[in-house]
Amino acid sequence: MQSKIEEVLIRLMSAGYEAYMVGGSVRDILLGKTPHDYDVATSALPEEIIKVFKEYKTLALGKRYGTITVIIEDEHFEITTFRTELGHTDSRHPDEVIFTDDVREDLKRRDFTINAMAMYEGKILDLHGGRKDLEDKIIRTVGDPEERFREDALRMIRAIRFATVLNFEIEEKTLNSIIDNAYLLRSVANERLKIEIDKILLSERPSIGLELLAKTDALKYIIPELHDCIGFEQRTKYHDKTVFDHIKCVVDSTEKNLKQRVSGLLHDIAKPKTFSVDENGQGHFYGHDEIGAKMSGEILRKFGYSKAFIGRVQILISEHMKVHEEISDKALRRQLRRVGSDNILDLYSLMIADRMCTTEGRDIDFLLKIRERAKGLLKEDIAKEKFLCLNGNDIKALGYREGKEIGNILRYLEEIVLDKPELNKKDYLIEILKNRG
């Protein structure tokens, strides 16, 4: 039984057109990976593509650039007419697209050699040495890197992302061109940058990408607040790394989820702003957690993260310094209520990563134990948003007025239950209020 991508290629070729799988899907297949999606290049013009796939739903949003999306059983296939491009005034879109019937011309316009191969029936068309660069683990532009980056400045961050995700090296000429042209990143939409940053952060070792962003000066144009952390000495017995090197270590040491990785990236963002030195020459960063939470909100809003996601990251950053070697069950329950059941385990994972990346990797055993205790608390009613066994209406029925008074009573009862969860019974709580007078 043929796969859907084979069906797409065969349909186009049966209709008399050339058709190839191209781009990242070819790269992934050669790396022994299953592609997440498939791109197809063809000699068929957009209207001809629509005609070939007339019994399927098609989307023509990219028709101006020769791209038609064909949907087969909920899978999307982007099919693009062979094309050349002229001019990129906005450093993203071509000023003019010229359709061609030559796949070789089409492959010339692509970003990197490893993405500039075409494939059909297992045969590879490789005009730019992409296969060798894959074998040698090299990221290299197709043709002149300066031209490629001026066509679309985001390609510089894509080069860094590919180097990070694949653990490849960026070829020297390509790397130097990123350094020379990093300023062009000022013109790239933050929403496009966000996609690449997220992929870097969710890689096995995000520090590779962060170091490249620093080395090329790209960071200065993407997150200048983070650029200020590069080379910043902390001058404290607790830290033997600069702020930026510590951040890289923390991001690598967090779990592979975006909330933790972004929180790790920004948790010490306010250290340069809050730095002070005492009479003994020791550095301090008073309030960097609260100020950093505020700064992180401004940064993440700029990139278009959701309000809910930003709020969660800000909670982790504002709480990450509240580390206690001993914490009572009541205090831990209070913390869980304060940060939320969705954030408590991520908070302790961030604390653990933060502590691992200090001088000589200080003890984390107590944090691991507290995290396990927090995991146990998540099974209690206390973890629910509304955990008391009575509500405002129950209190009102006892003769209390609405509004502030009821709110105060609920908080009073919460304090009792935080200390002794077994008392969270409706009849018992009503009895407490009756006896309160």
Image (cartoon, rainbow, N blue to C red):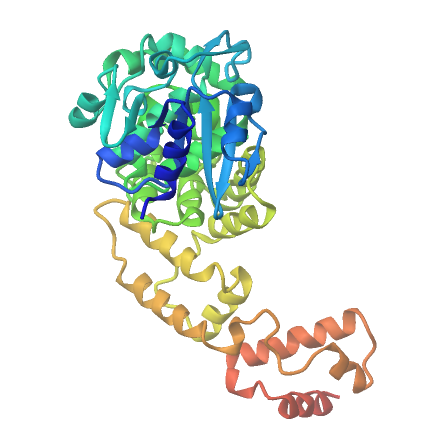
- The structure residue drawn at horizontal position 60% and vertical position 76%, both measured from the top left corner, is 414
Number of marks? 0
Estimate the x, y position of residue 331 in percent, counting from the top left: 47, 70
Nearest the eye: 307 or 278: 307
Quadrant assignment, res 246: top left
Q: Quarter-wise, where is residue 114 in the image? A: top left
Depth order, front residue of 53/292: 53
Q: Nearer the viewer, residue 348 or 433?
A: 348
On the image, which quarter does residue 402 sit in? bottom right
- Where is residue 360 drawn, in percent x and y? 21, 46
Say which residue appears at 48% left-offset and 33% top-offset. 194
Q: Is residue 173 left or right of residue 266?
A: left
* Residue 336 visible, this orientation: yes
Relative side of 319 to 357, left or right:
right
Give how far across and how far down residue 73 sits, in percent. Answer: 48, 48
Tell me the quadrant of the picture where the C terminus can be found. Answer: bottom right
Q: Is residue 30 above or below residue 146?
A: below
The one of 236 and 343 positioned closer to us in this rendering: 343
Where residue 348 appears, as percent x and y from the top left, is 39, 58
Residue 210 visible in this rendered orientation of the protein: no
Indicate left or right for 39 with 382 as reference: left
User: Which residue shows up at 57% across the image and 85% down it?
Assistant: 424
